[in-house]
Structure formats: C-alpha cells, structure tokens
Image: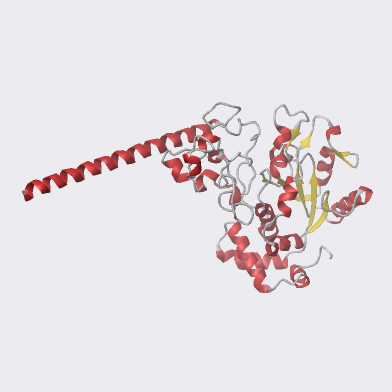
C-alpha cells in the first residue's frame, strides 16, 4: 500500500473498528502520560497524518531492540502504529537483500527528502571504518548520508543513544552514540538494553501526532524517562524503612525487601520499567527479584559490578547519585529507628496511664 494512504483507509483494510481505534488512542494517551482530554486530538492527528517513511539503520548491535519491538504486547496498538508508517528499510525485517535493499534505502531518501524519520540502533565505530560496514559502506558514512535528509532521528537502545556495550572500556572500536556525530538534526534518545516495546512505539506515535516530545538533558522523552525507577518501585517502602535484602536467598529477598545492597541501580536510573513494565505489564526485573542494572543510563556497563551497591567504589559512578542514594539509605535507617523509638515511647506512656488509673481505682 502506498505510503500516502491515510489512516482511515488502513483501518478499513485491516478490519479495525472506530471503537477499537478510539480505545487505542486512549491507551496511547495513558502511555504518554497525557490528559484524557488529549484523546480526540490524538485521534484527529493520526487520522489526518500521511504515512511517513521510516528508514531503520542497524549498526554495532545485537538485534535486541528489534526483537523487543517485535514483541509488542497488544496487536491492536502496535500493529496500528506499524501500519501508520511506511517502514522502507530495515536490515532484519525487509524482504529485499543485496543491491535491492540499498536501492530501497536510496529511493526512500530521494522521494521523502527532509520528511522521513531515521531510526538507528547500535553504536557507530569511528576508530576504524572496517569494524562495521553494510554493502561496503562504513556505518559512519551511512549514518551521515542518511541523516542528511531526515526530519528527525530516533536513537533506539543504549548503544545508539550513548555507545552501549561497544563503548564500554576499553572500547576497541571507538564506538559512540548518534548524538556524538550528528549535530544538526533533532535527536530523540530512547535508551534501554533493550527499551520497552511500548516506549519505542509510543515515541514514534508522539512524533506522528505532536512532533518532538519534551526531552530531558540526555535527549530522552520525559514522559518515559522523567522519573527514576526507585521513585516508582513497589519496594520503595522497604528502602524508606531501611529494610534491605543482603543476598538473593535470605529472608529479605523472599519477603520482597529493597535490593539496593544487591547492586540495584534504580535510584540513579530513569525509566518507565516500574510503571509500564514488560510483557503486557506482567513484571519488570526488580519484580522478578533481580536488581536494576541501570541500562537506560550512559556508561552503565562500566558503572561497577552488577551485584555491588552504589556505595561500593567500582567505576565512575555519578557522585551526585551516590550521595543521594547513600543519604536516602541513612534517612531510611534513621526513620526506622525513630519509628521504633516512638512506638516504645507510646507504649511506656500507655503503661503509665494504666498504672495511674489502677492507683485511682484502688
């Protein structure tokens, strides 16, 4: 179907009812943390939007981001998003190969110059172009060539956003993220190893309806990366009480206590994992009993051992984050002691009153 087809035509072709479409718009508003009043605007924008061309480039990556987005949990939502765009080039998903594949990319660039969305996953090696090439073209040259005609760039996954595992010490390929190379285009970073499927598609949907979303200092959409996992974690009450699991099979671990001492990076990691979760909202790593690895943050591969708490020196931790977490832990312990002291004081006062009443009655 032509990429100029309007959304109502696609809905009719795929048997999607108006009711299902409005339900999708309501779900999308919720995912993007928008008011219910925005639902009609989302519906109108999607209905009037032409199918934009999307070129997806994969560089030094593991295909995890593609695997994640293919596992989007609700077909009525994710299929609608994919059918509302024209995915003209994707190494893993396209049927074409060889010369035909590159011809498709060049044609999409030519026909949609200045209008297409460029999605990138994987880091870009700059130390030696021979580390990663596609059709004899280095990743660096292909990125620059394709970015030149893009309306905006979406860096999907931590590798494309910050360099990821390829950028980890000693970084033999000189791997960097997209924003280290492209300076003259709007760039939306959607980090994660991999990112949550609904976050990826939600960012694309937001761009289609409202344009570039509100971004934080690291270029991440605030709707999905505006709060730390720690702030929304269901284990947070245990942290505030100073109740921490000491190993993976002690009373605390079995009781769902805070995993901070087992290396959880939730306090310095911004992501929607604790709210949107994974697999249709079933769970997320901390709920499964595993500490957060901090995969949405720069240099997370180098920021200490996975099972070492942030208070243990190991790598280049963010000093402010460490101080905040250590302070929070101290506050949590102090709060628990104060609570215990208050209970003891109240019990003593109760005993005094009872003794006084007994004396009066006698």
State the residue at coordinates (65%, 73%).
Answer: 19
Q: Position of residue 279 (x, y in %)?
A: 64, 54
Q: Which residue is situated farthest in the left direction here?
A: 362
Q: Classify residue 298 by image quadrant.
A: top right
Q: Position of residue 332 (x, y in %)?
A: 41, 38
Total labels drawn: 0
The answer to whether residue 293 is left or right of residue 66 is left
Q: Taking the image as drawn, is residue 345 in sight?
A: yes
Q: Classify residue 164 by image quadrant.
A: top right
Q: Nearer the viewer, residue 154 or 351?
A: 351
Q: Position of residue 243 (x, y in %)?
A: 44, 39
Q: Nearer the viewer, residue 256 or 250?
A: 250
Q: Classify residue 347 by image quadrant.
A: top left
Q: Nearer the viewer, residue 102 or 325?
A: 325
Asked which colour scheme the image uses, the reply is secondary structure
Q: Taking the image as drawn, is residue 228 in sight?
A: no
Q: Is residue 39 above or below residue 145?
A: below
Q: Is residue 103 above or below residue 59?
A: below
Q: Quadrant of the N terminus?
A: bottom right
State the residue at coordinates (50%, 46%).
Answer: 231
The answer to whether residue 291 is left or right of residue 163 is left
Q: Nearer the viewer, residue 59 or 241?
A: 241
The answer to whether residue 223 is left or right of residue 256 is right
Q: Position of residue 120 (x, y in %)?
A: 76, 46
């Amino acid at each position: 179907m032509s990429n100029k087809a309007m959304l109502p035509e696609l809905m009719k072709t795929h048997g999607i009812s108006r009711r299902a479409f409005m339900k999708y718009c309501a779900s999308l508003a919720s995912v993007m943390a928008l008011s219910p009043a925005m639902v009609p605007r989302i519906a109108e924008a999607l209905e009037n939007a032409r199918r934009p061309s999307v070129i997806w480039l994969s560089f030094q990556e593991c295909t995890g981001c593609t695997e994640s987005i293919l596992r989007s949990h609700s077909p009525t939502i994710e299929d609608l998003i994919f059918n509302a765009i024209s995915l003209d080039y994707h190494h893993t998903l396209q049927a074409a190969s060889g010369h035909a594949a590159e011809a498709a990319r060049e044609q999409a660039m030519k026909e949609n110059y200045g209008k297409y969305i460029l999605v990138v996953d994987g880091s870009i090696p700059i130390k030696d172009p021979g580390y990663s090439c596609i059709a004899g073209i280095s990743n660096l040259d292909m990125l620059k060539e394709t970015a030149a005609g893009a309306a905006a760039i979406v860096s999907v996954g931590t590798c494309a956003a910050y360099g990821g595992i390829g950028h980890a010490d000693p970084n033999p390929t000189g791997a960097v993220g997209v924003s280290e190379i492209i300076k003259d285009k709007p760039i939306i970073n959607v980090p994660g190893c991999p990112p949550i499927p609904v976050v990826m598609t939600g960012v694309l949907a937001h761009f289609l309806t409202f344009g570039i979303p509100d971004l934080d200092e690291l270029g991440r959409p605030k709707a999905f990366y505006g709060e730390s996992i720690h702030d929304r974690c269901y284990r947070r009450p245990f942290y505030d009480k100073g109740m921490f699991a000491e190993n993976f099979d002690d009373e605390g671990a079995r009781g769902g206590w805070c995993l901070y001492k087992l290396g959880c990076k939730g306090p310095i990691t911004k992501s929607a994992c604790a709210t949107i979760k994974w697999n249709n909202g079933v769970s997320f790593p901390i709920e499964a009993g595993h500490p957060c690895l901090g995969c949405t943050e720069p240099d997370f591969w180098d920021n200490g051992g996975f099972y070492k708490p942030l208070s243990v020196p190991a790598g280049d931790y963010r000093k402010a984050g460490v101080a905040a977490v250590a302070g929070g832990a101290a506050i949590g312990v102090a709060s628990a002691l104060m609570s215990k002291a208050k209970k003891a004081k109240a019990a003593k006062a109760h005993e005094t009153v009872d003794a006084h009443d007994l004396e009066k009655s006698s």
